Image (spheres, rainbow, N blue to C red):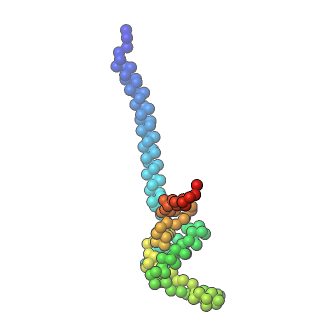
Amino acid sequence: MIAPNNSIRTRFAARLNSGVRRHMKLLDTFWLIALATLAMTSCSSSPKIDGSSKVAFERSHAALVASLSPEDQLRLSLAELIVLSTTGCLTTKPMPNQPFLNEMLGGQADLSSCRQELHGLTFRSIMELAYPHGYQAGGSALVPPNTSFKPNPLRGSA
């Protein structure tokens, strides 16, 4: 006697379902890992400057500077001066044991006098304010440079 088609279909469906279920479990695991990664990256955001008080400002600014590479520390210092020079809040303080520099430069910029202007900013936001057309950080620009300019060849040139 011939086996009914129903049993063949049932065995085929069982095999198909077992493979599909295994792949669905892998997909669920993938999404769980992706969500966990997203949650971790959002929690580990870059340090922000707290300008609520002078002590909080100094502590948060030091943490921001400490989180940066030496190159980015230099970029941050220059960007802060660029951003704050237009606000008129910058004051200077004398540099200890540097009479020549104090006389020539007028002292060192005191960022704590501009703590309200820097409140809530991160390294990236300060760089965006200082360089609105993009800046090089780690080899990549925030805003890609405009490379659409194509010079026309001179007349008579081959």
Residue 96 figure quarter: bottom right
What residue sits 47% from the left and 67% below the top?
A: 133
Q: Residue furthest top?
A: 1
Q: Residue furthest front?
A: 156
Location of residue 26 with respect to 127 vertically, above or below:
above
Q: Is residue 6 left or right of residue 141?
A: left
- Looking at this view, is 117 or 156 the one in front? 156
Q: Indicate the position of residue 48 as horizontal and vertical percent values.
A: 47, 70
What residue sits 44% from the left and 48% below the top?
A: 32
Q: Indicate the position of residue 12 as horizontal and vertical percent values.
A: 40, 24
- Looking at this view, is 62 or 74 the one in front? 74
- Looking at this view, is 15 or 123 the one in front? 123
Location of residue 49 with respect to 42 vertically, above or below:
below
Q: Indicate the position of residue 62 as horizontal and vertical percent values.
A: 54, 74
What residue sits 42% from the left and 38% below the top?
A: 24
- Looking at this view, is 123 or 145 the one in front? 145
- Could one spot residue 47 in this view of the protein? no
Q: Is residue 109 left or right of residue 35?
A: right
Q: Indicate the position of residue 10 as horizontal and vertical percent values.
A: 37, 23
- Could one spot residue 109 in this view of the protein? yes
